[in-house]
Image (tube, grey):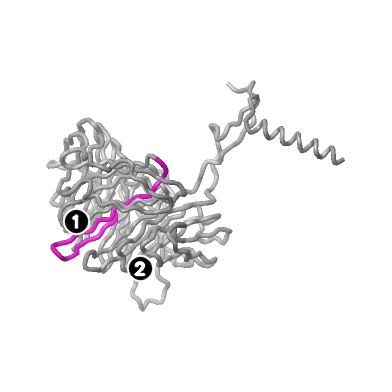
């Protein structure tokens, strides 16, 4: 009997060796028609909140609302930071906050029912002699390409590229810089090494000083990174603004820019030609009353590798409008705005089809601004919840094609007995293409960040055993 077991084990090992890829048979992984399944594990990296007086990470998942299934959500410093304090979601909570370690990057780890659609943002305020304002930064998955606009390195403005490598191996990045006078070929912009599990901060004035409208591309030639740009502005000796530039979409010939912040402050449309050939850009405003082509800005010609900035304050007046730009070659576009003494930016974001988890910043007003990117538009449903996942309110908002709309929230008075809204879940149907961003206002300032839907499904690898004779 024992000999039979040995022979059977040997046969099993032989079969496994054949399936694993011998010369007579093949293993086909993820063939056409592979199935998709729910995400069971998600990791997001949050940037460090450098120079912050108050900082907090807020995380959650729309898939776990109203459910008590298995799963966990944890926020903790990256392994190499030296900090070991973490926060874990309890069974009664639907959103997790983490106020510690502002100066180190943090990992948001979700498993089980908490993983599908997991989202997080980090917000912080500064009120020092060198920096003042409110900042909201999205936590994201590592990537290979990152684009930022508009970066300002002129006198009185400090802009730093913050690159985090969450992996256990060295990452290497190159920078692509496009200014008003064309490409910037600065010394040291290639082969920038980021040690495992660390964050590196680079002053962009070192590469392109004195530029008020710079486009920065980050390309990871080895490994994957998470990147952002922190910009602070001073008026003489007085700090007057703080903003975290979230990444905008990669260069494309058809770009939809999220609605600009509503108000009377300065507003600029920034466009970069990311190629080696001249670009002709057609401009369309997507306003609250519908689309129109501005007479003064109907077409813009941009030389190769060049960034242009157009003052659009008189064109928009106080409207919170989006933009659609079409060109003969690939471009990058965004807008910049000022409100009071603080500044905010809006870039080109992804389609919001599906569900998006949006935590609310404490004691702050919130505005989600949407734009219909195509003629069809779409329907947006915003559902408010308290911290324990109890539904408070449902709002439905029709977003016509090529038109801008907004949903706003103001915190209730402190004397109100009803639990305050802790987060909202934004659902957009598949019938149209709707984009949007999130604007946060508080006594500390204003900040804006693009809305991005969560990841709910993944391709499930299929291992298929096929004899060599039946393969083409």
- The residue closer to the viewer here, 401 or 199, is 199
Dominant secondary structure, magenta = strand
How dense is the environment of label 2, judged by Cα within 10 Å: few (below 14), some, or many (20 and up)? few
In the visual, does 113 lie left or right of 191? right
Q: Earlier in the sequence, mark 2 or mark 1?
A: 1
Who's the residue at 30% across and 64% down the image?
51
Q: Which residues are magenta?
A: 222-245
- From the image, tell me which residue sits under label 1: 157
| Residue 183's disc number | none
Residue 100's image quarter? bottom left
- The residue closer to the viewer here, 433 or 243, is 243
**Distance CA(mark 2)–CA(mark 1):** 28 Å
- From the image, tell me which residue sits under label 2: 362
Q: Is residue 322 above or below residue 136?
A: above
Is residue 316 on the magenta stretch? no
- The residue closer to the viewer here, 49 or 248, is 49
Residue 183's image quarter? top left
Residue 340: x and y in percent read 18, 63
In the visual, does 111 lie left or right of 291? right
């Amino acid at each position: 009997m024992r000999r039979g077991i040995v022979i059977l084990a040997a046969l099993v090992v032989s079969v496994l060796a054949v399936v694993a890829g011998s010369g007579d048979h093949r293993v086909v992984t993820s063939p056409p028609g592979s199935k998709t399944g729910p995400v069971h594990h998600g990791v997001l990296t949050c940037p460090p909140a450098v120079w912050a007086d108050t900082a907090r990470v807020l995380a959650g998942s729309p898939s776990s609302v109203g459910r008590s299934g298995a799963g966990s959500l944890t926020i903790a410093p990256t392994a190499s930071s030296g900090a070991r304090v973490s926060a874990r979601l309890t069974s009664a909570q639907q959103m997790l906050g983490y106020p510690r370690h502002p100066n180190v990057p943090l990992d948001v780890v979700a498993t089980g029912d908490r993983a599908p659609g997991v989202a997080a943002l980090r917000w912080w305020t500064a009120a020092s002699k060198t920096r003042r304002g409110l900042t909201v930064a999205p936590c994201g998955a590592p990537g290979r390409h990152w684009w930022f606009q508009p970066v300002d390195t002129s006198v009185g403005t400090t802009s730093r590229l913050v690159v985090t490598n969450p992996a256990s191996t060295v990452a290497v990045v190159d920078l692509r810089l496009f200014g008003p006078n064309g490409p910037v070929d600065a010394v040291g912009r290639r082969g920038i090494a980021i040690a495992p599990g660390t964050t590196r901060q680079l002053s962009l004035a070192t590469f392109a000083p004195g530029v008020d409208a710079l486009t920065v591309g980050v390309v990871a030639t080895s490994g994957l990174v998470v990147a952002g740009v922190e910009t602070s502005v001073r008026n003489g000796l007085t700090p007057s603004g703080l903003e975290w530039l979230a990444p905008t979409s990669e260069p494309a010939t058809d770009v939809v820019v999220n609605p600009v912040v509503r108000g009377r402050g300065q507003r600029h449309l920034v466009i970069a030609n990311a190629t080696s050939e001249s670009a002709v850009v057609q401009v369309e405003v997507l306003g609250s009353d519908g689309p129109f082509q501005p007479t003064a800005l109907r077409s813009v010609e941009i030389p190769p590798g060049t960034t242009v900035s157009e003052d659009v304050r008189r064109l928009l007046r106080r409207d919170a409008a989006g933009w659609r730009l079409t060109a003969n070659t690939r471009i990058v576009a965004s807008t910049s705005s000022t409100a009071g003494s603080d500044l905010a930016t809006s870039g080109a974001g992804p389609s919001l089809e599906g569900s998006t988890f949006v935590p609310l910043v404490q004691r702050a007003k919130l505005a989600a601004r949407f734009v219909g990117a195509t003629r069809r538009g779409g329907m947006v449903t915003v559902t408010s919840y308290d911290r324990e996942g109890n539904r408070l309110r449902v709002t439905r908002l029709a977003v016509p094609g090529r038109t801008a709309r907004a949903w706003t929230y103001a915190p209730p008075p402190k004397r109100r007995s009803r639990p305050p809204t802790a987060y909202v879940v934004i659902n957009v149907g598949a019938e149209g293409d709707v984009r949007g961003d999130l604007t946060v206002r508080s006594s500390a300032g204003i900040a804006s960040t693009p809305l991005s839907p969560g990841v709910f499904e993944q391709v499930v690898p299929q291992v298929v055993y096929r004899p060599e004779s039946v393969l083409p």
